[in-house]
Image: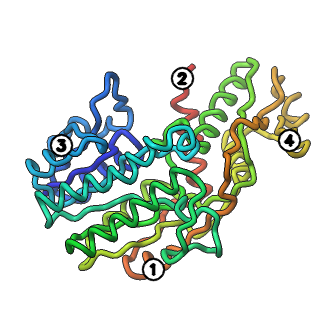
Amino acid sequence: MKIIVTGILGQDGANMVEYLLKNTKAKIFGMIRRTSNPNFVNCNTFIKNERFQLVYGDLSDSISLDNLVRDIQPDYFINFAAQSFVGCSWEIPLQTFDANATGVARCLEAIRRFQPKCRFYSAGSSEEFGDVQYSPQDILHPVRPRSPYGASKAAARHLVKVYRESYNLYAVHSILFNHEGTKRGEEFVTRKISKGVARIHHAIKNNKPFAPIELGNLDAKRDWSDSEDFVEGVWKIMNQEKPKDYVLSSNETHTIREFINKSFHHAGIQGVWHGSGQEEQMSVSTEYAIKNEIQSSVLIKINPKFYRPAEVELLLGDSTPAREELGWKPKISFDNLVERMVKYDIDNFKI
């Protein structure tokens, strides 16, 4: 068995490779773009594995994708490569659409032309639902994106459906609600929080001043899971008798404020909220400040530049079909997810 996995430098691709090496006997081909200085920090556990091979390709280059599919003749093609940061998608909308939508079309074309028996997975996003009409959101929820990123993923979803129905391909585009973990990129709000908490933890420990973590909308509600749970679900989706799209989610929703509170709790830092609107802040409690001789006081402050032009206020998934039909369910709770991220960043903190 041969499997191509894209986006292996990111959290989902890396977790997918780890899962496949552990649970299958397949040869894994991990695709990355040629860059001057690739960051392999997420690949340390498998980069030298004899069943793993690094290959070069680019979602913006159809020739590279054609060559990979023609030469490898994969049984599975799992696509996690993307311009995955929602906030940046307003600044680079064309690049976002080229990677996330047209890139999927290039993958599908390569499979159609050179290996039509290959099973294809396209990573969907709850951002496709956008301005939600009802909660929880299931696979039938209307597509109503509120960002170029969400629109690009919605386009990819339609492309997968067209190729599946036109060419009888096993191609699926399943909706992944928010998922995080210790491999999450630092530009994402959850990792920004956990790394910021780790930075403040070590400053307090060493009796040094610290700068607050600056964030935008604290009241946005998200359905958070751990990426490691989701890759198992993806593999189950890829191995059904017939292709079918699913939602993967925790079926719970939590605010960014809750993520902050739990993060500081797991770091042993006592904070209190005060103020309102853009003046709202979180500071260390008076008792904690006196006890630990704190050099700074503000933990969290609002910075309007981190507000999105159009916010998705509520995302809450309904993954009941995946649970009932695939036998899948997340193993890592929201609290455990936050604890794992904070502990990892405290233990691996570097100045």
| Rendered view: 122 above or below 58 | below
Q: Secondary structure at mark 3?
A: helix
Q: Where does residue 115 sit, x and y in percent of width and height?
A: 12, 60
- Observer-side mark, 4 or 2, equals 4
Can residue 65 be seen in the rendering of this structure? Answer: yes
User: Could you tell me how far apart the alpha carbons at marks 3 and 2 are, in whole angstroms?
Assistant: 41 Å
Residue on which the image places disc 1 = 321
Amino acid carrying mark 4 in the image: Glu
Marked residue nearer the N-terminal end (4 or 3): 3
The image quadrant of residue 220 is bottom right
- Packing grade of label 3 (10 A; few <14, some 14-19, many >=20) is few
- Locate residue 75 relative to residue 148 in the image: left or right: left
- Please give the residue where the numbered disc 3 appears in the rendered image: 63
Foreground mark, 1 or 3, reads 3
Quadrant containing the C terminus in the rendered view: top right
Question: For mark 2, what is the residue?
Answer: 350
